[in-house]
Image (cartoon, rainbow, N blue to C red):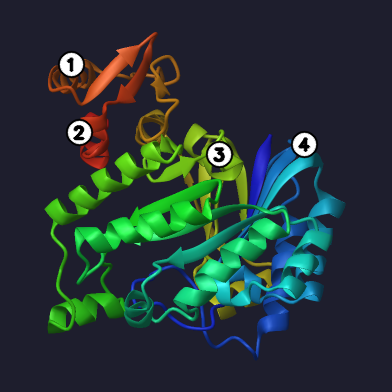
Amino acid sequence: MAGIYIHIPFCKKKCTYCDFHFSTTFSDYREKMIHAIVQELKNRVSYLGKQTISTLYFGGGTPSLLTKEELMLIIETVYQNYHVDNEIEFTLEANPDDINVEQLLIWKSLGVNRLSIGLQSFLQEDLDWMNRAHTAEESESAVKLTKEYGFSMTVDLIYGLPNRTKADWENNIDKLVTLSPEHISAYCLTVEKQTALHKLIEKGDLPEVTEDDQSEQFETLVHKMKESGYQQYEISNFAKEEAYSQHNSNYWKGVSYLGIGPSAHSFDGESRRWNVANNPQYIKRISEQTSYYEEEILTPKDRFNELLLTGLRTKWGVNLELLSFKHCPTKEFHKQLNAFKAFNLIFEEEGTLFLTEKGKLQADHVAAMLFLE
């Protein structure tokens, strides 16, 4: 089983915190971009061998901006050139302002069965400084309509926002829990350089949020999710009745995937590729059949570190046998591992390593300390 990720690099507006690859001025080359994506899909049929495609994910950017005809062209290319599972998980990222009855019926007719809805916050003040295109009212309507029309869904929230109290964050969670989506992803706000958010904080227009505040909000999130019947199956992801994201779970488990579109990444088990993060260059190089990506062959240490980092974040943990690459793990690894066990950050069960609740608060630090240099 494998997955396909398709990056749609178009957005209506630029969110203040976003450093993903996208453009808000794309009308003059929109058609060329769609055809370049289609051509790349055809060119890379052999990348995954003959593996069955079990997940298809349209991300971005804002895939919900695509017309029915544009989506249909890309989807038909996938089905005509790849062996697609009959029970495929087909996810499309959508902004609340794009979700209406007409669009839901179109997406359903094209085979989409799961939506990833970027709410981020139910507070209009937050949405305003984020420069989001939707309103708080549209957020609630989008979730209700999506559920009414039979889609599976995941909903995004961001915590650690400026000017927000613990009570504000609790109200955000309670509002979402009341709407009862089967899957919730909650991410800590990160301030990336070269973003509008970074400039706002530098100028003092927004306060910087402390790590202690972010940790407190994360702990509140975990408590409320558990209390409401959601299982934390990955540090930032919560699901009811095992409604896990198959696509993202495969990333964390080291399953192969093909990334299509500008800036998209691919992984075949031995190497990683990443496409050029420049829309005109991507289109030009696809058209001219010249190289449009870079590639890295993964060493045993690279694979060790990646499996460790992703596996520790999940409910499935990381199996020590899977970490047994050439010269891995080392004596230093075991020494550090035992230290983390003693500090109650990691525990081992039947040859598999798991983070404790305390360890989840320091997941990146724990993994980094166990990395092989």
Percent position of residue 12, x then y: 54, 83
Q: Which mark is residue 50?
A: 4
Three-letter amino acid code at the position of disc 3: Tyr
Q: Which numbered disc, 3 or 1, marks the residue that appears first in the sequence?
A: 3
Q: Which numbered disc, 3 or 4, marks the residue that appears first in the sequence?
A: 4
Q: Which numbered disc, 1 or 2, marks the residue that appears first in the sequence?
A: 1
Three-letter amino acid code at the position of disc 4: Lys
Q: Residue at x 29, y 59 (%)?
A: 169
Nearer the viewer's eye, disc 3 or disc 2?
3
Percent position of residue 267, x then y: 55, 43
Q: Residue 262, located in which quarter of the rendered image?
A: bottom right
Percent position of residue 243, x then y: 58, 39
Q: Are marks 1 and 2 in contact (CB under 8 Å)?
A: no
Q: Which mark is residue 369?
A: 2
Q: CA distance from mark 3 to mark 1?
A: 31 Å
**Which residue in the rendered view is the most extreme toward the right?**
80
| Observer-nearest of 76 and 46 | 76
Nearer the viewer's eye, disc 4 or disc 2?
2
Q: CA distance from mark 3 to mark 4?
A: 25 Å
**Which residue in the rendered view is the most extreme toward the bottom?**
28
Nearer the viewer's eye, disc 3 or disc 1?
3
* Residue 271 shown left or right of residue 334 in the figure: right
State which quarter of the image contains the N terminus. Answer: top right
Q: CA distance from mark 4 to mark 2?
A: 38 Å
Residue 88, visible in the rendered structure: yes
